[in-house]
Image (tube, helix red, strand yellow):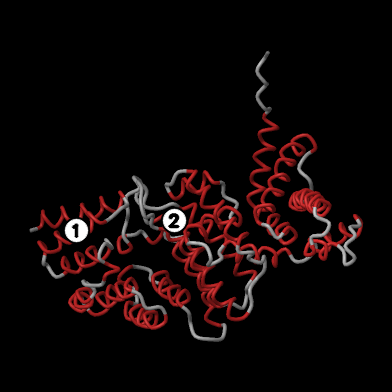
Amino acid sequence: MEPPSPPSADTRAAHAAVGAIWHIESARVVASVARLTRDLGLAEECAQDALVAALEHWPAEGIPDNPGAWLLRAAKNRALDHLRHQAQAMPKHAELAAELDAQHEIKSADFAEMVDDALDDAIGDDLLRLIFTACHPLLSPEARAALTLKVVGGLSVAEIARAYLLPEPTIAQRIVRAKRTLAAARVPFETPHGAELAARLASVLEILYLIFNEGYAATEGEHWMRPALCEEAQRLGRVLAQLMPDASEVHGLAALMEIQASRLAARVDADGAPILLPDQDRSRWDRTLIHHGLEALARAEALPGPFGPYTLQAAIAACHARAAAAQDTDWARIAALYDALAQVAPSPVVALNRAVAVAMAHGPEAGLELIDALATEPLLTNYHLLPSVRGDLLARLDRIDEARAEFERAAKLARNARERALLLARAAACAKAS
């Protein structure tokens, strides 16, 4: 028996096109079908069936003029078949029967019309529901992040596992358990309202920023950054900003991520070693991202109400973005913004960052006093940036031996290999200077 022939170049090109289109359209397809099935797992299965159908048909028939609509129709047909089968198997199921027909009689034409009407609603509403469902606070932050990247971001389990340096089965289990948890709790596939919206929105923004931060400064591993995670968080932030134009903190987070991401190319050298903010070549900062970020910040600041934590952090990032050189940075304004942030969202990390800003604005002695006040903070006991910042301030005060000890302590606490190497290099420079 002869082995199967390898796919032709045309077939490979078509499959690549399907993959690219799927990455763009998958969240919308899942979102629209999930509103019908009330089951996120089933919606994903139907969407995957549509993807398989596209891989089978498009290489021979050509990519349709509206591939997103083609995928949605295929997934809808699969969902329709499933719901019909379920209704026939359980004709007395009151909830399902009520949705299908007030008289508990299923008529195919009426049912298909109901499905079409549902799918004709604004896809943006469905996508918003999907984002809030994937980021439900009932789930752990790790599960929310994995589920969001999978069903909203369209990433594969392998891609998520690679990004977080975890085994694929671990990520797969998180996603499966998250879906089961949502199904068991009968979490409605809807956008919450009122006070619940504020609470759930905070969860959504938290997860998007968690994903971005893991890409911006990786917790572990051999690479300091994972830009793909940053890009995915930015994309989701832009989507959310379009869907919720009146939510200031949504624009604030979008602004923060755009401005921070503008520095990615300048944050590492040719060998992947970290370059700290004062030493970065600002000509390598992405001016387009800065422009988009400043526009989003202006929208956030123009909306009514007090500034939230993401808008304040975006305003801090904007101070750096507007400075042509490190010495031009308005550290007094940054310190004032951290004062405001400490009132709105107090935390030991915010206090640490505020100490850095005070040191830059008013001298290392003032910053060191604030740093030393944090020495007994339990949440910072194993946080490598506390001794790292203290070492930097001690070095600026020419207390070189003390600085070296702090850099060495920070290196022992750092879990990222690149960051650890940077801290050890700074310790060695202190030893050489002493």
Q: Is mark 1 on a helix, strand or loop?
A: helix
Q: Is mark 2 on a helix, strand or loop?
A: helix
Q: Residue furthest left?
A: 434
- Tell whether 298 sits left or right of 331: right
The residue tagged 1 is 409
The residue tagged 2 is 215
Residue 278: percent from the left, percent from the top?
Answer: 30, 64
Residue at 81% across, 51% down: 89
- Tell whether 406 sits left or right of 354: left
Report crowding for label 2: few under 14, some 14 to 19, many 20 or more residues within 10 A (C-alpha).
many
Question: Which corner quadrant holds the C terminus?
Answer: bottom left
Q: Is residue 120 visible?
A: yes
Q: Mark 1: which amino acid?
A: Arg
CB under 8 Å between callouts 2 and 1?
no
Q: Which residue lies furthest to the top in this view?
A: 1
Residue 61: percent from the left, percent from the top?
Answer: 80, 37
Residue at 60% across, 70% down: 241
How many marks do you count on the picture?
2
Report crowding for label 1: few under 14, some 14 to 19, many 20 or more residues within 10 A (C-alpha).
many
Q: Mark 2: which amino acid?
A: Gly
